[in-house]
Image: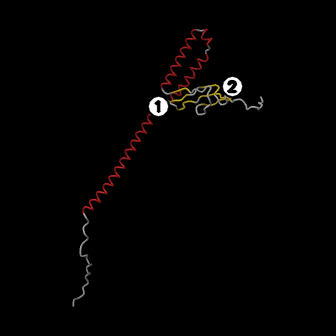
Amino acid sequence: MTEPTNEPIPAEQPAEAAAPADPLAEAAAKIAALEADMAKTKDAALRAMADAENMRKRAEREIAEREKYAVGNFAKALLAVSDNLRRALDAVSAEARAADPHLAKLAEGVELTERELLSVFERNGVAKIDAAGKPFDPALQQAVAHVDAPGVAAGCVVQVFQPGYTIHGRLLREAMVTVAKGAPPAGVDTVA
């Protein structure tokens, strides 16, 4: 008889080791995985390029906007000069011009200066708001008074105290205007 030993009994080993996988199938799986990774990378690259292009276009638009409106504060300051030139011209009556040739020449020079300033405004996108006789627009005008104006529709601008201006379509300064109240409804007595 044989003597028992304390040696472990070896585990049964399969008769055949695991069969090697098909090399073509492995290669095809690796190729498919690489193609999927390449598609993801290509998609990410295309998205990044599109984002960069959109950012470039946005930056160009912002720069163009800044250039367009950069003179806004300067133009707004010059509006006071335009207003004063107009006030100077309005202060000289036609009779006073006819009576004094020196005053007539001075007024003519002020008119030429005003026209040149308005021409410079126009070339730089600054436009006067035409408000007189038109319906009141709170986006472009500030009503400083409401008056009874027979023959004028309610809500129409009767008088412009200070002209308003836009720069490239954006409000630069509101026009200060007087607006017609309109006639009271028929049958209503007004108390003075």
At which x and y percent is residue 188?
76, 32
Q: Amino acid at mark 2?
A: Gly
Q: Residue at x 26, y 78 (%)?
A: 12
Numbered disc in front, either 2 or 1: 2
**Quadrant in the picture for the N terminus:** bottom left
The residue nearer to you, when weighing 64 against 31, is 31
Q: Residue at x 34, y 49 (%)?
A: 42
At which x and y percent is residue 121?
50, 24
Q: Residue at x 34, y 52 (%)?
A: 39
Q: Secondary structure at mark 2?
A: loop
**Quadrant in the picture for the C terminus:** top right
Q: Secondary structure at mark 1?
A: helix
- Do the residues bearing badges 2 and 1 touch, measured as CB atoms within 8 Å? no
At which x and y percent is residue 56?
40, 39
Task: Report how far apart the C-alphas of labels 2 and 1 lie in the structure.
Answer: 42 Å
Task: Tell me the number on the disc at residue 68.
Answer: 1
Quick one: which residue is furthest to the left in this view? Answer: 1
Q: Between disc 2 and disc 1, whose residue precedes?
A: 1
Q: Amino acid at mark 1?
A: Lys
At which x and y percent is residue 95?
63, 11
Badge 2 is on which residue?
Answer: 151
Quick one: which residue is furthest to the bottom in this view? Answer: 1
